[in-house]
Image (cartoon, rainbow, N blue to C red):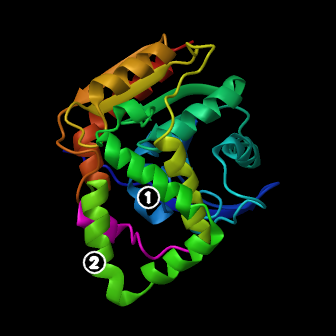
Amino acid sequence: MHTPTPPPPTLGDVVLPNTRLHYVSCGSGPPLLMVPATVSLISQWLPLAQFMGQHFTAYFFELPGHGGSWPYPGKFESRLVPATVQAFMQAMGHETFNLMGFSFGGLLALRTLEALQERIENVILISPCVSKRALLYSPSRQWGFRLLSAAFKRSLVQQSAVQLMHNKYMERPLIYALSKFANIEESILKTKNALNIPQSTLDVLAYTLDEIFSLDYDYPQKPFLHPCYFAMSRYDDLLDYVTTLEIVKEHFGDLTTRAFTLPYHQPPEPPTFDWLNQEFGTFLQLVTTLIASRP
């Protein structure tokens, strides 16, 4: 049996009107922008970019204020992201492109779709967070997240929090507490190096968490006319499958869905290129076949 080879990544930096983005591109084919999920690094998303790069020219960038991307001149706001996406894809030489949102990047993907409808051809949503109603957290825990995000928007709180998070003696208790509060495996937090972040990243995280835990996405002019390809596990441990699917169905008249049976939202170990092909290769093949067959 032929074993797929991951396409080599190309790293780069591009200066845009409000930021300088650190990005990666993989593969060849129709352009695909993978929208970042909250505070994600290229190193964490590279296997997924290479997986999608088997059929697309896949792009991923680190959000302004995180990783190697410069912060916006002011506070981070999701309403600024679509203009950044537009400028980035123009810099890459693409007038139109496909859009992909995974996990909490699903919300940013839909915001981008709202603003750039004429530039986007197809939408791929993988386990997207589209509403606080789909979150499998108790109301009290959701309220706790909102209180934390409100506090972390303050510069003095951010400075104190970063000092505490960077204290090596606090690493173990903080990882344990965060794991229990957020219902996330400790191994995932350690892999993401969750405590070793600068103040600008904490600002991005505070804003995005506040939006995630307060939003019930509803585009007034729904449905979108774009073809949408949706995949999610029925046993996702962070998002309710039925609620998420209902909201996506309301917003896309041309919808292709696939349900999986993985017992988690995110694998406890970092996904590899081979694992992604094993678990999602048939879905990627379906998507690319359907896209190619459209006039």
Q: Quadrant of residue 120?
A: top right
Q: Is residue 193 magenta?
A: yes
Return the residue nearer the eye: 125 or 171: 171
Mark linked to residue 272: none
> The disc labelled 1 sits on which kind of residue?
Leu
Left or right position of 10 against 281: right
Residue 189 vertical position relative to residue 85 in the rendered view, above or below = below
Give, as a single range, the part of the protein colored magenta.
Answer: 185-198
- Residue 224 in picture, x, y percent from top left: 58, 16
Residue 164 vertical position relative to residue 221 in the rendered view, above or below = below
Label 1 SS? helix
Q: Quadrant of residue 159?
A: bottom right
Which residue lies under the disc numbered 1?
46
Which residue lies under the disc numbered 2?
173
Return the residue nearer the eye: 178 or 46: 178
Q: Quadrant of the C terminus?
A: top right
Query: Residue at horizontal 43%, vertical 28%?
Result: 288
Judged from this view, the residue extending furthest toward the right is: 17
- Residue 110 in picture, x, y percent from top left: 56, 31
